[in-house]
Each structure stands twice: as C-alpha cells, then as structure tokens.
Amino acid sequence: MDAEQAFKEGLSNIPLTIEGEVSKLLPDSHEGAHHQKFVVNLHDNHTILVAHNLERAYKVPVKIGDKLEIHGTYVWNKLGGIIHNTHHDDRKACQRTNSDHVVCGPSHEDGWIILSSQKDPHRDS
C-alpha cells in the first residue's frame, strides 16, 4: 500500500514506507514526548508530516531538499497524514484486550528514516 491509497481510504495506524523530499522544516514539539517535525513531499505531490520521537531516537540532520526513505505508522488527517513511530520499538508495552487478557510486547513495527541523498552542499539553493 502507498501513502496516496492510505489517504484516499482514510486509513490510520498502519505500517507504511514512503520516499520523498523534505519540503518544510517545523519547530520541534515539546508537548508530551519531544518530536522533530518536518514535511515530506512525495513524488505524486502528496505531503505527509513526519513526527520523529526524539526521546526514542536521535535527531535526523535533514534540510529542505533532502531525499528520505521513511518507515513508520501512518495516521490519516485531511492534510495528507502523519507518519510517526519512525524508530526502533524495544519497549515491552502491556495492554489489556477486550477479553480481559494482558498481552505484552512491542507496541509497533520498528521504524526508520534513511537520508538517501542530499542536495549538493556546494550548490546554491
């Protein structure tokens, strides 16, 4: 499944991999968990907000124009969606099921951000 299909179907909380270019850098969020935020423009002109948890992973040294591959959990919104959980999940979270059983294990698939190419630093933007 790709981001455009997930957006059109209004899906949320699904693992998704995207590739695109950083189009906007946003201030880090300090409400709740500390997150690095930036917008990625996909090849089809669809944009997705990336919320990268800085309490679970290092800050990614992204700049506008950088090309990235990102895997995380997609959450739908009317602006194109959000990808979070872009980090390894080594927690042993426990949750109570509807049948009152307690199940423990990672809460999401491991995510990642790969900085696949950057603009030439010697070229003017």
Image: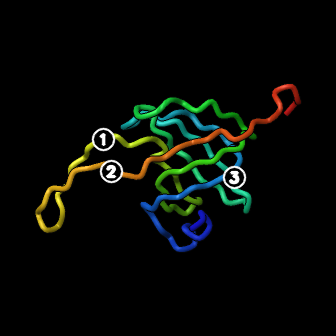
* Type of amino acid at the residue the image marks with label 3: Asn
Name the residue rendered at 80%, 35% in the picture: 119
State how far apart marks 1 and 3 are (Cα).
31 Å
In the image, 80 versus 15, the foreground residue is 15
Q: Position of residue 81 (x, y in %)?
A: 54, 58
Residue 23, image quadrant: top right
Q: Position of residue 52 (x, y in %)?
A: 50, 40
* Type of amino acid at the residue the image marks with label 1: Arg
Q: Which residue is mark 2?
A: 107
Mark in the foreground, 1 or 3: 1
State how far apart marks 1 and 2 are (Cα).
7 Å
Q: In this image, 99 relative to 123: left or right? A: left
Q: Which residue is mark 1?
A: 91
Q: Position of residue 110 (x, y in %)?
A: 44, 47
In the image, 75 versus 117, the foreground residue is 117
Mark 2 residue element: loop
Asked if 49 appears above or below 120 in the picture, the reply is below
State how far apart marks 3 and 2 are (Cα).
27 Å
Name the residue rendered at 65%, 55% in the picture: 47
- CB atoms of marks 1 and 2 within 8 Å: yes
Residue found farthest to the right: 123
Asked if 74 appears above or below 112 in the picture, the reply is below
Q: Position of residue 72 (x, y in %)?
A: 49, 51
Mark 1 residue element: loop
Does label 1 or label 3 sit earlier along the sequence? 3
Q: In this image, 124 relative to 84: left or right? A: right
Q: How many marks?
A: 3
Q: Residues within 10 Å of mark 2 (few under 14, many from 20)?
A: some
In the image, 105 versus 86, the foreground residue is 105
Q: Which residue is mark 3?
A: 41
